[in-house]
Every structure is written in C-alpha cells, then in structure tokens.
Amino acid sequence: MKTFVILVFILMSFANINAQDQHKFTGTFSGITDNYYFNFKDTDGKIIEFNEMSDDVTIDLFDENVIGKKFEIKWKVITIELTDESGEPTGETTTGKQIVTIKEILSKK
C-alpha cells in the first residue's frame, strides 16, 4: 500500500509539472506570417506568434476561413534547432512557442 501511495504521488507530481509548463492565451487569429508563424492578437492589441502546433491539434490554421475567429490556446515553450540556408543543422538552438490545444470561442448572438 505504501508503494502504491508513493507511485500515485510521483505520477501526480509529473502531471503538475507538465501543467505548469503550459500557458493560456485568448486571441483572434490574424493569419500566417511570411515565415509560417501562426499570428494571434488579443483584445489589448498584443500579438503572439506561434512557431508550430502539436500533432494533437485538429483545427486547420492553414484554412483561410479561420482568420478572424477567436480561440482559446494552451501553449508551451519549445526548443528549436536552427539550420543554415541549405537546411543543415547549425548546432545552435532558440526558443519558440508550440500550440498544445486550441478551441474556438463561439460568439454570442
């Protein structure tokens, strides 16, 4: 029983760490930039660009019909490996933002 309690505690700790790594943002989709970043703007005019989407995301942000729609987004910071002009890794990294989940917020009529 003691082992079971310790195992549950460890699993809950990992779940809590993962949840702490995620951020929330609500904004309107403005479209895709020339660098293929997903561009969103909140009600205060703050712009956030996301580098990529998780494979679990089912909304197609490449569809022009979603431009102008409002979304609730959960995202996390990721590490991106940089490449040179020919696509070869440089060994350098930078940080970016990945959309983990995205849900459309339907307007009230």
Image: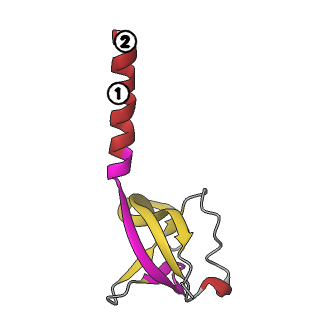
Total marks placed: 2
- The answer to whether residue 109 is visible is yes
Region of the chain picked out in magenta, as a range: 18-40
Q: Residues within 10 Å of mark 1 (few under 14, many from 20)?
A: few
Where is residue 57 drawn, in percent x and y? 60, 62
Where is residue 91 drawn, in percent x and y? 40, 57
Give the quadrant of residue 87: bottom right
Q: In the structure shown, which secondary structural element does the residue marked by tag 1 occupy?
A: helix
> Residue 83 bears which disc, if any?
none
Q: In this view, does 11 lie to the left or right of 88?
A: left
Q: Which residue is drawn at 54% across and 84% down?
A: 108
Q: Is residue 69 magenta?
A: no
- Name the residue carrying label 2: 3
Asked if 83 appears above or below 3 in the picture, the reply is: below
- Name the residue carrying label 1: 10
Q: Which residue is drawn at 45% across and 72% down?
A: 50
Asked if 41 appears above or below 18 in the picture, the reply is: below
Q: Earlier in the sequence, mark 1 or mark 2?
A: 2
Three-letter code, disc 1: Ile
Pick whichever, 99 or 16, lies toward us: 16
Q: In the structure shown, which secondary structural element does the residue marked by tag 2 occupy?
A: helix
Q: Which residue is drawn at 33% across and 85% down?
A: 46
Q: Main secondary structure of the magenta part?
A: strand
Three-letter code, disc 2: Thr
Asked if 96 appears above or below 43 in the picture, the reply is: above
Where is residue 98 drawn, in percent x and y? 46, 63
Color style of the picture:
secondary structure
Q: Does the magenta stretch include residue 30?
A: yes
